[in-house]
Image (tube, rainbow, N blue to C red):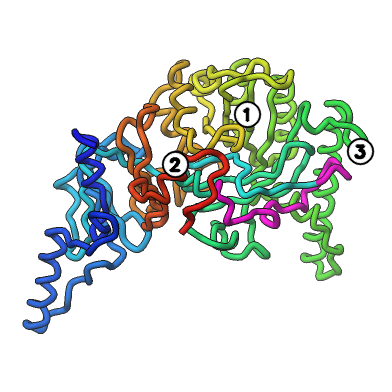
């Protein structure tokens, strides 16, 4: 490969990475100077500088897109111990002694992408014995070694909301995952203890999917009535527990269904509501207004018809998707790429998701480009891939933008992020590289078919 792109690709190789195959590691000039400084410091009895190879990285020369601020054409990102220490123009960010310097001139550097709605990990959800399963946890069904997770890393995704399906009114609890290289689902969670903490949201659905037959509601009106009744029971359960705590009485027996819903009512667990048709969207907003929970609307095929109503509701926002080939069911017939511009113009929060496998996680950026083609702003589309999604998961204090103090989750691209000719070169999570396109094993995940299995490290 020749030209600017080829030079940038070669320059992006991490210091210490083998320059040809897997040969002898090399030190950058800054690291040689730092190493000599250690010798001098020892001779003078001074405190030594940080050792080369510590978790201290400087990425220099890329076009940095912080999302929370303007682009930086010749930028520096400084990472220490998995967190962003500084970001800014070259010349304004000092490179500490001992930093591992990555010369990435010619590349673009963006926050890791946030996918608010995915079905990676081969999980399932509640069965059809009931329309309501708030106690079911997708966490208990996720395969942390599913190759789909590495395909997502190849697409630049670093945070993902894994959902149960949409065949029920309440399908269960979602899981917010950080796509570290890990062998167990516990190692992927944002939370520390899934037994005592809220580690995701709650998946709800209305419209065609959950109507069904048998124990399913059968009509849209009955669907809303069942959800309303379940939340009323949760309110009563929460009141009994609070009363017992205040009076020193005996609390009601544990009810796992009610516990999840009381977390929703307390604002600790966000509702992620699958909905398509304009009247279904308004029903979802009506239920939210009645019970006051934090809400994200998902899919919203008819968003352009009710964009003002969505914006006025004051919810966390709408996470949108438009498949390459719209259709498949009546309520999605109006699905297209106008929703992004309509919601943005109305002032509503807008994120984009893959619904993987509806859209392959490796094609996530392409969705944003399609929304831009239909009138959404470029900056709005890039925010929809990153910070807006982080807000809708309640994780924007940690991910979604390049700001000091946030997790060092970012990607390096060899061109404009909205171009179909651009590829993710590297994906980093908490200051550690989890995907490297120059590694043949990783490249296979970036380019291989849906059955790709090998290459996990």
Q: Nearer the viewer, mark 2 or mark 1?
A: 2
Mark 3 and mark 1 in contact (Cβ < 8 Å)?
A: no
Where, quadrant-wise, is the N terminus in this rendering? top left
Mark 2 and mark 3 in contact (Cβ < 8 Å)?
A: no
Total labels drawn: 3
Q: Is residue 333 above or below residue 91?
A: above
Q: Position of residue 288 (x, y in %)?
A: 71, 35
Outermost right residue: 214
> Can see residue 267?
no
Residue at (44% x, 41% y) in the render: 446
Q: What is the distance, in whole Å, between disc 1 and disc 3 at their CAs?
A: 25 Å
Residue at (51% x, 61% y) in the render: 182
Mark 2 crowdedness (10 Å alpha carbons): few <14, some 14-19, many ≥20: many
Q: Is residue 140 magenta?
A: yes
Taking the image as shown, residue 322 lies to the left or right of residue 330, namely left
Q: Position of residue 258 (x, y in %)?
A: 80, 53
> Can see residue 436?
yes
Q: What is the distance, in whole Å, between disc 2 and disc 1 at their CAs?
A: 26 Å
Q: Give the residue pinned by disc 2.
A: 446
Q: Position of residue 157 (x, y in %)?
A: 47, 44
Mark 3 crowdedness (10 Å alpha carbons): few <14, some 14-19, many ≥20: few
Q: Which numbered disc covers residue 299?
A: 1
Disc 3 secondary structure class? loop
Mark 3 or 2 closer to N-term?
A: 3
Q: What is the distance, in whole Å, between disc 3 and disc 2 at their CAs?
A: 43 Å
Q: Is residue 146 magenta?
A: yes
Taking the image as shown, residue 141 lies to the left or right of residue 238, namely left
Q: Is residue 33 above or below residue 128?
A: below
Q: Mostly what secondary structure, the magenta segment?
A: loop
Q: Give the residue pinned by disc 3.
A: 215
Q: What stretch of residues is rendered in magenta?
A: 127-148
Mark 1 crowdedness (10 Å alpha carbons): few <14, some 14-19, many ≥20: many
């Amino acid at each position: 490969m020749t030209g600017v792109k080829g030079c940038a690709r070669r320059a992006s190789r991490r210091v210490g990475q083998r320059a040809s195959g897997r040969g002898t590691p090399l030190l950058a000039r800054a690291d040689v100077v730092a190493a000599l400084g250690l010798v001098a410091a020892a001779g003078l009895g001074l405190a030594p500088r940080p050792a080369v190879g510590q978790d201290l990285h400087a990425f220099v020369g890329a076009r940095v897109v912080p999302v929370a601020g303007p682009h930086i054409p010749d930028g520096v990102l400084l990472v220490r111990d998995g967190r962003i220490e500084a970001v800014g123009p070259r010349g304004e960010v000092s490179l500490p002694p001992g930093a591992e310097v990555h010369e990435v001139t010619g590349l673009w550097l963006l926050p890791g992408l946030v996918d608010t709605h995915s079905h990676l990990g081969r999980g399932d959800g509640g069965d059809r014995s009931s329309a309501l399963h708030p106690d079911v946890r997708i966490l208990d069904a996720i395969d942390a070694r599913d190759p789909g997770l590495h395909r997502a890393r190849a697409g630049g995704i670093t945070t993902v909301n894994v959902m149960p399906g949409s065949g029920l009114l309440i399908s269960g609890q979602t899981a917010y995952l950080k796509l570290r290289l890990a062998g167990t689902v516990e190692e992927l969670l944002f939370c520390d203890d899934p037994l005592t903490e809220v580690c995701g949201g709650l998946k709800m659905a209305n419209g065609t999917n959950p109507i069904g037959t048998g124990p399913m509601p059968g009509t849209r009106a009955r669907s809303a009535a069942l959800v309303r009744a379940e939340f009323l029971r949760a309110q009563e359960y929460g009141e009994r527990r609070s009363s017992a705590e205040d009076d020193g009485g005996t609390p009601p027996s544990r009810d796992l269904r009610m516990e999840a819903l009381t977390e929703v009512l307390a604002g600790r667990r966000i509702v992620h509501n699958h909905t398509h048709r304009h009247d279904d969207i308004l029903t979802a907003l009506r239920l939210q207004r009645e019970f006051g929970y934090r809400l994200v609307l998902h899919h919203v095929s008819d968003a352009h018809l009710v964009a003002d109503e969505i914006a006025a509701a004051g919810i966390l926002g709408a996470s949108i998707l438009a498949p390459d080939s719209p259709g498949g069911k009546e309520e999605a017939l109006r699905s297209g790429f106008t929703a992004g511009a309509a919601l943005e113009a109305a002032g509503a929060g807008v994120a984009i998701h893959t619904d993987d496998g509806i859209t392959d996680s490796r094609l996530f950026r392409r969705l944003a480009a399609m929304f831009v083609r239909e009138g959404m702003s470029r900056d709005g589309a890039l925010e929809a891939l990153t910070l807006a999604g982080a807000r809708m998961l309640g994780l924007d204090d940690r991910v979604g933008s390049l700001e000091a103090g946030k997790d060092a989750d970012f990607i390096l691209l060899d061109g404009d992020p909205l171009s179909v000719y651009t590829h993710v070169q590297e994906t980093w999570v908490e200051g550690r590289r989890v995907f490297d396109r120059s590694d043949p094993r990783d490249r296979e995940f970036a380019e291989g078919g849906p059955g790709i299995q090998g290459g996990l490290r």
